[in-house]
Image (spheres, grey):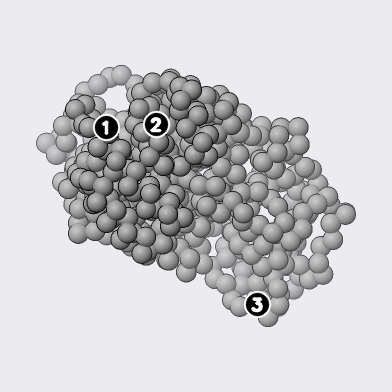
Amino acid sequence: MIKPPSARNSKQLGLVLFGTVALGCMAPAAAAVLAIVGATVVNPERDAAHAVAKAQTIVMTDERITAVGPEGRTPVPKGATIIDGRGKWVIPGLIDAHVHFFQSGNLYTRPDVAAFPTVPYAQEVARNKKRLPETFKVWIANGVTGVVDIGGPMWNFDMRIQSEQLPIAPRVAVAGPLLSMVERPQLDLGDPPIIKISDPAAARALVFRELEKRPDYIKVWFIHRPGDDLAAQTAIVKAAAFEANYKGVPLASHATELDVAKASLRAGASYLVHSVEDKPIDDEFIRLAKKNNIIYCPTLWVHLGYLYALSNRWKPTEAESRLADPQILAALGGIDKIPEAEWPPLVKKLMADPAEPKLSPVLYANLRRVRDAGITIAMGTDAGNIGTVHGPSIFREMAMMQEAGLTPLEVLRSATVGGSRALRKDADTGTVTVGKYADLVVLESDPLANLQNLSHAWRVIKDGHVYNPVELMKSIHP
């Protein structure tokens, strides 16, 4: 249970405890101190023999961790609010290293893939912008205290400001519009998330425009089709990387084929936001990846999300039933409710195919190769794409990473330590360490015994503020 020192100090904390959520933050007269006592702490940055520390005390002062150590030898300041952590497990706040807030995850969010006239795209985008506060709550309820929006409209930068100003929101890193090799006019409502770039000069011009907004990344959508000039495309990526890196901004690349991924790395990319999926990773890729000190984000589930949703096979997991935005769950549940005359060609094709969607084993093998090479892996879902809902899709993704051959500790490391690198806040997040932000998840059960235990957070702590996931989900407007 949570024991406040007094009613007066609880008010100073700006928190409503005992099974409710923190809905605001008053300016305290003195430092707000919170302590978790007696918990088992999982330290994902350590090896398996040293990752688990039992009977620990964690002290948080305002937004930072100020002490971590064995219970009984780690003093708890007088007047601190106490959380009884006995029988609980504490991990760093989770980080999803690949999301898109301009997309919702429902059937209507990517008309360039499948356009349903049932919901006009302008209506869908307006809904997504208006619902940002609820989407932020969903992320916190899932134990996710940081996300990387790796590309969207210019209003992405306003979204980042909104996340900083709202009392309940994850930390957000952003990229602006994707520098693309292909057009996506279906997504252009005057502030397009994807902009076709024809030459290096156009690439530099868009990078300069985005740099004015202080992006965390510049992102290229490196789509290479048969007959495309790979050298000319690579020159575009190189121009973008040069201008971005000159200002200290890393380049992220959507490059899902081995040759394209290697071209991205030679051009200066340091974040590959998807798996290499067409063929096995080779030694040259590993050398380039290590030279660039890259982050590799596998995004295993997202392709299946499209296939399941557009073939009417998508069903919510137990975690999604509890922890996804109910609006999105309702919108995902039933292409068969849409008149068949309104089905786009892709949907008709998938609905007629009896085969169960499957993932290529190449993606699994490449993830193991990257792991074995010691390259940083960051868990990311590509949330917002059709069938990949914001929040609880992380539990699908992490289960698939374990299926690929990563241990539960390695998966957790990718969602904390690796994610903190992708968030560009590894000095402040990713571990339960003195001096870092008080971003923690208190779990009912051991996550290393079963990764699905991550979906049962008892409390989520962000910036030292305590949230009850159950009550937080109840607060979301239907």
Q: Amino acid at mark 3?
A: Pro
Residue under label 1: 230
Looking at the image, which residue is at 29% across and 41% down? 235
Q: Does residue 33 appear in this view?
A: yes
- Total labels: the figure holds 3
Q: Does residue 125 appear in this view?
A: no
Q: Secondary structure at mark 2?
A: helix
Tell us which disc is closer to us: 3 or 2. Answer: 2
**Neighbour class for label 2 at 10 Å: few (<14), some, many (≥20)?**
many
Give how far apart the Cα atoms at labels 2 and 1 are. Answer: 11 Å
**Neighbour class for label 1 at 10 Å: few (<14), some, many (≥20)?**
some
Residue under label 3: 28
Q: Is residue 122 left or right of residue 433?
A: left
Tags 3 and 2 in contact by the CB under 8 Å rule? no
Please identify the quarter of the rendering in which residue 115 is found: top left
Residue under label 2: 262
Looking at the image, which residue is at 51% across and 51% down? 423
Tell us which disc is closer to us: 1 or 3. Answer: 1
- Labels 3 and 2: the sequence-earlier one: 3
**Neighbour class for label 3 at 10 Å: few (<14), some, many (≥20)?**
some
Residue 123, percent across and down?
A: 22, 56
- Labels 1 and 3: the sequence-earlier one: 3
